Image (cartoon, rainbow, N blue to C red):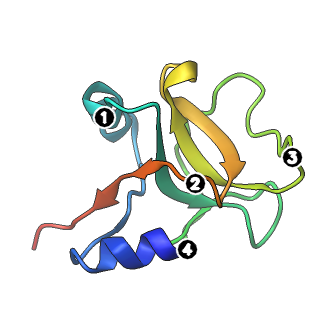
Amino acid sequence: MYLQEVCRTKFGFLAEVEDADENRFLKSNAVFDSYWIGGTDKQTEGVFMWVHSGVKFDFNDWDNGEPNDAEGNEDCVQLKKEFDYKWNDSICAMNYHFVCEIPWY
């Protein structure tokens, strides 16, 4: 995934939203229409995992009716302004802003 490589150049990875506080932080700082975060179900349809850690979601904030794989190939997780920045599964090739998570050491 290209965006993951961009985040790596900053010593990070696509954001893994692990709890409600982190999710609220992202939503309250969002200014663009859409953002990618680091979730996908490319390996197994309907089983969403974080790209960087490979961990299955413990927390999620899906919009009503999501994830729905509407196009038959919606495998990446997007924060979507239209849905009040709730999560949506979308086509991975779409060109959206993205959120990198950079760990503090």
Label 1 environment density (alpha carbons within 10 Å; few <14, some 14–19, many ≥20): few
- Cα separation between marks 1 and 4: 21 Å
Label 3–label 4 contact, CB within 8 A: no
On the image, the x and y values in percent for residue 17 come to 42, 49
Task: Say which of 38 and 1 sits in front.
Answer: 1
Earlier residue among tags 3 and 2: 2
Q: Is residue 46 above or below residue 28?
A: below
Counting residues from the start of the chain, the first of labels 3 and 1 encountered is 1
Quarter of the image containing the N terminus?
bottom right
Q: What amino acid type should be assigned to the residue bearing mark 4? A: Gly
Residue in view at x 64 percent, y 38 percent: 88
Kind of residue sitting beneath label 2: Phe
Tell me which corner region of the image, top left, top right, bottom left or bottom right, holds residue 16.
Answer: bottom left
What residue is shown with label 2? 57
Check disc 1 and give the amino acid type: Asp
What residue would you read off at disc 1? 21
The residue pinned by badge 3 equals 71
Q: Which residue is mark 4?
A: 54
Asked whether 85 or 52 is in front, the reply is 85
How far apart are labels 2 and 1 at the CA level? 15 Å
Q: Earlier in the sequence, mark 3 or mark 4?
A: 4
Q: Contact (CB < 8 A) between labels 2 and 1?
A: no
Label 4's element?
Answer: loop
Q: Position of residue 74 (x, y in %)?
A: 76, 52
Residue 29: % across, % down: 25, 31
Q: Is residue 43 above or below residue 48?
A: below
For the point 33% across and 29% down, the residue is 24
**Rounded to the nearest whole Å, what is the CA distance between mark 2 and mark 4?**
9 Å
Residue at figure coordinates x 45%, y 69% from the top left: 3
Query: Which three-letter amino acid code belongs to the residue tagged 3?
Result: Glu
Residue 39: % across, % down? 56, 58
